[in-house]
Amino acid sequence: IVAASELMAGQEIHNTYGEYGNSELVYKYGFALRDNPFDSVSIDKQLLLETAKSHTQPDAFDAKCSFLNEFSELLEEEEEPFEVLPGGIINAPLAVTLRVLTAANDDFRSWTSLEDALPTTSAEQEASKEEGQMLERKLHEGGMAHKELETCLAQAVAVALVLGEQECVHAAGQEHENVVKVLA
């Protein structure tokens, strides 16, 4: 630890650990905070893709993945992770990927770039919201298709979330075992 200013003998000092989620706090310092505002859960990209693939027509899934690979690096493992932040907020890479993977095929086929997939102005956002509400009404009138889609997506996100959390807990346990071995 390096002091930011001169210290007097016997003076109380405070250590700020930084804006870290619990997995990083456990890894670096050996403790976790309840209701940590910087906590997040990473979602394994391959698991998300496998789940999406199981709920999508193969040709449509392949086309959407090709689209994402052509216009972004979102699916590359070494790029920014997919994360769920406190309050259930998802980060931008996950939001964009889900938008593309869950897009209606007619909408998707009209896109020529990643920007086409995203509403950019408040008027476009409002139009997109209205289109979504209209589509929701049509699907609701047509039966259970929309509810099944919602359920599948919710299950996929829940599975990915739980597995991500399990990975964090497992990593913390492994780190604890490593510390115990070193101390023994």
Image (spheres, grey):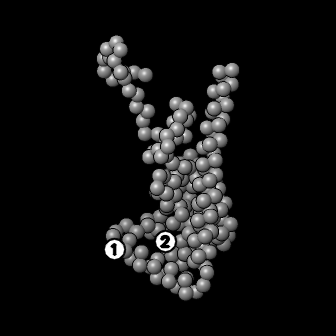
Query: Residue 80's x, y, as percent?
Result: 51, 49
Percent coordinates x, y for residue 4 in the rendering? 33, 23
Give the number of the disc on residue 111.
2
- Nearer the camera: disc 1 or disc 2: 1
Q: Residue at x 63, y 32 (%)?
A: 176
| Residue 170 in the image, given as x and y percentages of width and height | 65, 41
The residue closer to the viewer here, 172 or 11, is 11
Q: From this viewpoint, is residue 168 visible?
A: yes
Residue most extreme to the bottom? 141
Name the residue: 47% across, 52% down: 86
Q: Which mark is residue 123?
A: 1
Residue 70 in sight here: no
Q: CA distance from mark 1 to mark 2?
A: 18 Å
- Asked if residue 176 is positioned above or below residue 5 in the image, the reply reads below
- Is 120 situated left or right of 56 in this image? left
Q: Check disc 2 and give the amino acid type.
A: Trp
Which residue is rendered at x = 63% and y = 45% of the image?
167
